[in-house]
Each structure stands twice: as C-alpha cells, then as structure tokens.
Image: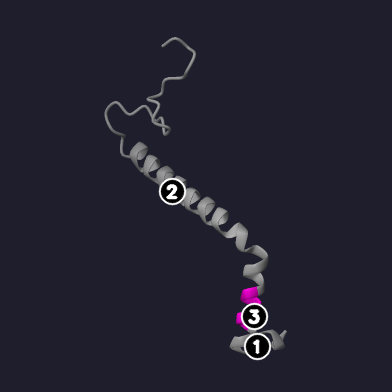
Amino acid sequence: MLAFFTMNHWEWIAILVVALLLFGHRLPGMARSLGSGITEFKRGLKEGADKSAGGKPGDDGAADGSGGKSGGTGQ
C-alpha cells in the first residue's frame, strides 16, 4: 500500500492518460448529468424555502411550469 503513494508525477500522468483514453467518451455525458442534478437540487432547495416561508401568492407548487394544469382533464 505504501508503494502506491510513492509514485512520481510521470506515473500519475501515465495513469491519467490511460484513464482518459478508456473513459474519455463518457465524460461529457457524465458532466451534463452532474450539472442537471445540481440544478434540480438547487430548484428543490428553493421550492422548499418558498413553501416554508409561505410561498408566493398564486403559487400552486408546480415545478414544471405547467401551472398545475394536468393535460386531458378538461380544466
């Protein structure tokens, strides 16, 4: 285990290059997924704070911007 921490910088660079060659095509999708997850988390925090503060007048709690109307019900 001690030998793992005694690697010099060239060995770390070689491992990084191999990892990028193996997983490089997946990185943009993973970054996009991470970004949308963070956005959804922040949106949830904001909605929770709005609900605990009483919310805005006319706010029905719909997060998708549909105004709370469900399609196909005739409302």
- Residue positioned 37% across, 27% down in the render: 60
How many numbered callouts?
A: 3
Viewer-proximal residue among 72 and 19: 19
The C terminus - image quarter: top left
The part of the chain drawn in magenta is: 12-17
- Which residue is label 1 attached to? 7
Q: Tell me: residue 64, above or below residue 72.
A: below
Disc 2 and disc 3: Cα gap in Å? 34 Å
Rendered image quadrant of residue 28: bottom right
Q: In this picture, is 24 found above or below 60?
A: below
At label 2, the amino acid type is: Thr
Circles 2 and 3: CB atoms closer than 8 Å: no
**Mark identifier at residue 14:** 3
Q: Name the residue type under label 3.
A: Ala
Is tag 2's residue or tag 1's residue first in the polypeptide sequence?
A: 1
Q: Residues within 10 Å of mark 3 (few under 14, many from 20)?
A: few
User: For mark 2, what is the residue?
Assistant: 39
x, y percent for residue 1: 72, 84
- Decide: marks 2, 1 in contact (CB < 8 A)? no
Alpha carbon of mark 1 to alpha carbon of mark 3: how far? 11 Å
Q: Main secondary structure of the magenta part?
A: helix
Q: Position of residue 43 (x, y in %)?
A: 41, 44
